[in-house]
Image (cartoon, rainbow, N blue to C red):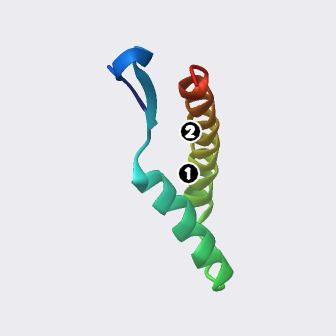
């Protein structure tokens, strides 16, 4: 994940949270394969489970950043 602080006029700056779209793709593809009857290997399942944790944290950080950015208005 990356944090980016940009100057944003009178507000002093905006906080942005970025994470790789590959993370989202991995979680979605693993879910789709499982739904079509192709359960992934245990090692892949472990990786996907870890990716889900990072994805959830990224979403939470984005919500926090949006709240922070809207505090001035």
The residue positioned 62% from the left and 69% from the top of the image is 31
The residue positioned 63% from the left and 85% from the top of the image is 36
Q: Position of residue 17 (x, y in %)?
A: 46, 33
The residue positioned 58% from the left and 25% from the top of the image is 73
Rendered position, 59 above or below 73: below
Determine which of the numbered discs, if any, sits on residue 58 in the image.
2
Q: Nearer the viewer, residue 58 or 64?
A: 64
Total numbered circles? 2
Secondary element under disc 1, as helix, strand or loop, is: helix
Quadrant location of the N terminus? top left
Q: Quadrant of residue 3?
A: top left
Q: Nearer the viewer, residue 37 or 18?
A: 18
Rendered position, 5 above or below 45: above
Mark 1 and mark 2: Cα distance apart in space: 16 Å
First along the sequence among labels 1 and 2: 1
Left or right of 10 in this view: 48: right
Foreground mark, 1 or 2, reads: 2
Secondary element under disc 2, as helix, strand or loop, is: helix
Q: Position of residue 22 (x, y in %)?
A: 41, 55
Q: Residue furthest bottom?
A: 36
Determine which of the numbered discs, if any, sits on residue 2 in the image.
none
Is the residue marked by circle 2 packed among few (<14), some (14-19), or many (20+) residues within 10 Å?
some
Q: Position of residue 58 (x, y in %)?
A: 56, 38
Q: Residue tagged by mark 1?
A: 47
Q: Quadrant of residue 65?
A: top right
Is the residue marked by circle 1 packed among few (<14), some (14-19), or many (20+) residues within 10 Å?
few
Q: Are marks 1 and 2 in contact (CB under 8 Å)?
A: no
Q: Nearer the viewer, residue 27 or 14?
A: 14
């Amino acid at each position: 994940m990356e944090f980016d602080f940009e100057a944003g006029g009178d507000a002093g700056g905006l906080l942005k949270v970025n994470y790789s779209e590959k993370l989202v793709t991995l979680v979605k593809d693993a879910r789709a394969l499982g739904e079509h009857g192709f359960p992934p290997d245990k090692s892949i399942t472990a990786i996907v489970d870890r990716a889900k944790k990072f994805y959830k944290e990224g979403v939470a950080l984005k919500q926090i950043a949006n709240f922070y950015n809207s505090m001035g208005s």
